[in-house]
Image (tube, rainbow, N blue to C red):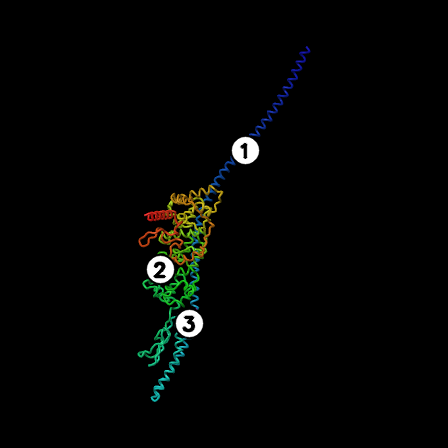
Amino acid sequence: RRGLLEIIKHTAGTNESYQERLSRLEGDKESLILQVSVLTDQVEAQGVKISDLESSLVEHQHKLNSTEEMLQQELLHRTSLENQKLSLMGEVSYLKLKLADMEGKQGHGAERQHKAEGLLKELRILKDKVEHLEDQKLQYEKKLKATKVKESSNFHGVWTLKYTTSAQIPLLTVHSTFLNAVQCDVPQPQKVYPCPYRLRRTQSGGLQAADPDAGQFKRGGLRATAGPRLTRTPESYDSARDMNIPFSQWTKEQVCGWLEDYGLGQYVSLSRQWVENGQTLLSATPQDFEKEMGMKNPLHRKKLQLALRAFTTKVIEKSSELDHIWVTRWLDDIGLPQYKDQFHEARVDGRMIQYLTVNDLLTLKVTSQLHHLSIKCAIHVLHANKFNPHCLRRRPGEEKQPTPSEVVQWSNHRVMEWLRAVDLAEYAPNLRGSGVHGGLIILEPRFSSETLALLLNIPPQKTLLRRHLATAFSALVGPQATQEKREYGNATGHVPLTTTAKVKPKKLGFTQFSHLRKRKPDESADYICPIDSGALTMNGVSRLPSAALRGLSPSLDRQAERREQIGIKAEANGLKQ
């Protein structure tokens, strides 16, 4: 019994504990249901937020695409504005040079006007003196008539006439000489004396023999003109350009007008005092130009000598049609606008470009070796195009892949456009003032992609960018030029082209003075770019090109080396025979 009671009690306790657990679990279940409902509400709210964020993300993506399109349009617009700016800068520089020329001509005109006013005043004074002398002459004529009336003193009257006329001659001679020196065309009264001692005013300022057939005294009957006029007339302008008349027969007026039109107007005033005709300039030496005309600038003397040589040889060169204003625009095209002032002051024109030497460039303050090569290749391009003033291309054309014959005619602005086309627009402005143009890229064997990278200021650590530039450069110059540049760079003794190398003038030692007498002044080796790029032909015999042609083109260098080797072999065979 006791055991059953204990079992009953134990079961009753366990039932109570089960009920408590059941009630506790039911409470936990209710709390979990509440938590699940709360979490579902939160999940729904987060889902709404995620959908809102996705929609806003799509909107921002659309805005980003639109801003990228606007940025591309802005970049295109900026490049077009930069092109317009470059063209406007070129036009502004041209207009400035033209304005400077106009101001110089206006200054010369003001000086002439001032001199003319002074000369007119002197002429008025001289007219008064001449009128006074004429009054005295009339008085002497009256006295002569009175002496003729007296028959008893005939011989005495003749002696009086001789005395009075001889006293008058020195005054008239002095005034006539001064009037002949005045640069003006003013009619002067005629000096007429009765027979047998009649005097006449002449151009030379001296006295002539009496003219027994001359009439009575009247004003304006004889012109006393002396020398050139103050201003050039259209007749003198046209006659100065009449090539049928030899230059040696040109008058002083024609020579001075030609000097002014040729850009050497600052020497006209001294030339009027020295030059008598065209033969004076033809027979003069450079020392005479410096002494008599005050021509201190050696390039001005060279310009004048080349023009006089063209008159003497009567050879019309195409380069003579290009004036010094065109040369300043040409410097813009080849990327050297910093030298425009020096070239303009030296009045360098197309003919001078054809005969430029290294010393001339040093006189023009062009000391960079790269700039010397740039001018040299640009002159070679002008030679190849027969000095066509429009041979350089400034804007891109319709060609997709330009050939080297087209690239050689590219200007500095066209090379910058090419850099923009190959995705290097941010480095394109660095080419301004560098002297890089198509002729330098193609014709100079030492100019490579590394040289271009140095000029563009591309850092050496940007290897991918430099590799991209090298690939684009090789595609531009073509496989043949690329191979020639590579062979030239791998040759022994090759000196790479740098942007800091300077050209120094040659210093002559004591042993080299003897060679100066043997050297001819017109030797083609002295020019920075000789006239003939191939073998020179003289009297039907083909000769090797001069040393100045070396480095102009790798193909020309190899041809010259082959010709030299053939000549050496021929000489060796001749010696053996």
Q: Please say if 161 is above or below 396.
A: below
For marks 2 and 1, the one nearer the N-term is: 1
Residue marked by disc 1: 46
In contact (CB < 8 Å): disc 3 and disc 2: no
Which numbered disc, 1 or 3, marks the residue closer to the eye? 3
Identify the amino acid type marked 3. Answer: Leu
Residue 510 place in picture, x, y as percent: 44, 57
Which numbered disc, 3 or 2, marks the residue closer to the eye? 2
- Marks counted in the figure total 3
Range of the magenta residues? 115-120
Residue marked by disc 3: 120
Identify the amino acid type marked 1. Answer: Gln
Secondary structure beneath disc 2? helix
Q: How far apart are the alpha carbons under marks 2 and 1?
A: 94 Å
The extreme right residue here reads 2
> Would residue 74 be seen by someone viewing this image from the given angle?
no
